[in-house]
Image (cartoon, helix red, strand yellow):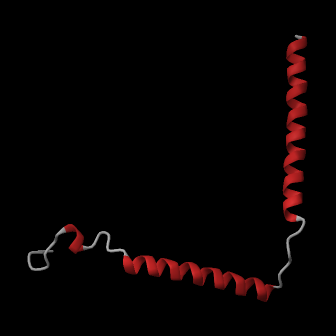
Amino acid sequence: MPAASALLVLLIVLSILGTMGLWYAIDSETAGSETLSRADAERVARQDSTDQRQEEDDRDASDDWGSDAEWGVDEATDRR
């Protein structure tokens, strides 16, 4: 029985220490972040989405995967 009690105490202590460690990690990561105004945040968000959309458009333009030409389908014999 003493071993079970010691194990229970150890698990409680480890869970408390883990919670405190996680809190410290999150707190230290968010401590130095800069605060943007709403207008600046919207501008940054639009810029990011525009950059991402441009990358997707470039990838779609050069990618011919799944087209009829790739599958060998001839338009003249295509009977849809």
Q: Nearer the viewer, residue 24 or 42?
A: 24
Image point 88% across, 51% down: which residue? 23
Image point 89% across, 59% down: which residue? 28
Q: In which quarter of the image is the C terminus?
A: bottom left
Residue 25, given in percent of the width and then of the height, sits at 85, 53
Q: Outermost residue toward the left?
A: 77
Q: Outermost residue toward the top?
A: 1
Quadrant in the rendering for residue 7: top right
44 is higher (above) or lower (below) than 26: below
Residue 72, given in percent of the width and then of the height, sits at 17, 69
Q: In which quarter of the image is the N terminus?
A: top right
Residue 65, given in percent of the width and then of the height, sits at 32, 70
4 is higher (above) or lower (below) than 31: above
Q: Nearer the viewer, residue 60 or 3?
A: 60
Q: How many marks?
A: 0
Quadrant in the rendering for residue 10: top right
Residue 57, given in percent of the width and then of the height, sits at 46, 81
Q: Which of 56 and 13 is in front in this view?
A: 56
Image point 87% across, 24% down: which residue? 8
